Image (cartoon, rainbow, N blue to C red):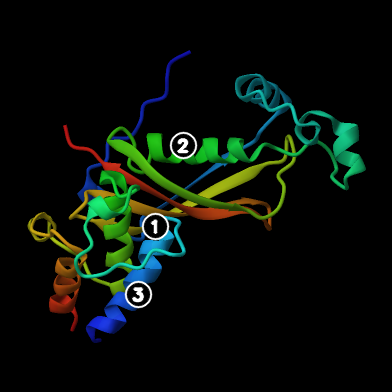
Amino acid sequence: MTTPSAEINALEDLTEGRSLAFDFVVNAADMADFSRLSGDYNPLHTDAEFARGRGFSGPVVYGALLVANVSRLIGMHFPGQQALWSGLRMTFRDPLMVDEPARLEAVISHQSVATSSIKIKITIRAGDKLIASGSAESMVLTA
Amino acid sequence: MDDAAIYAKLTTIFQDTFDDDDLVPHGEMTASHVEEWDSLAQIRLVVAIEMEFDMKFAVTELGTLQTVGDMVALIRNQLP
């Protein structure tokens, strides 16, 4: 399997209003991998019966796996290869369920020449349901 | 907008950037007064200021800043 290549975007390419969206699904294997990686075995994420007992249709996707897709956005697209991620604010608004299709939408809201950085507005939705929203900041490094 | 109004907006920005509701910037304040004020925080601060005041700074302008008072003067000079 080949490793996907990160985009190479200079600061001047990352103009305000430029947008991007991609789809993703978190499956049971992703959840198990993250449980092991993080050490977070909270049953809300690992035990379907426990989650159903608390009003959910099944295990709730880890918020950190939503953030993992922000990492994909920063590291692969905005800015891509030139990224140095410097900040994130994210509010989790509604749970995402395992195997539920989701879409991350990103718009560059500010380009700062003085600091060689960008700010990106981010929303994650599952259909019409708003799962998470926030913003991220990244420097755009030069070689 | 007078300096008091600029400082009022900066106070909100500083408190938000440094997650400190008690932080009140003043003219003589420098990065050495705020433990969390490192290079990445500086970037977040500048981006927040540019967005709040709807202006963009040049690299050369930032390089001359020593204190919050210098930043206020820079903002004042760029206001319409």
Q: Is residue A132 above or below residue B76?
A: above
Name the residue nearer the viewer: A21 or B61. B61
* Few, some or many residues within 10 Å of mark 1 (<14, 14–19, 20+): some
The chain ID associated with circle 1 is: B
Are the two marked residues, 1 and 2, in contact with CB atoms closer than 8 angstroms?
no
* Few, some or many residues within 10 Å of mark 2 (<14, 14–19, 20+): some
**Residue at 10%, 61% in the rendered image:** B61
**Residue at 28%, 57% in the rendered image:** A111
Q: Secondary structure at mark 2?
A: helix
Query: Which quadrant of the figure contains the C terminus of chain A?
Result: top left
Residue A50 lies in what quarter of the image?
A: top right
- Distance between mark 1 and mark 2 Cα atoms: 21 Å
Name the residue nearer the viewer: A1 or A97. A97
Residue A46 lies in what quarter of the image?
A: top right
Q: Which mark is residue B9?
A: 3
Q: Secondary structure at mark 3?
A: helix
Q: Determine whether, in the image, residue A74 is placed left or right of residue B3.
A: right
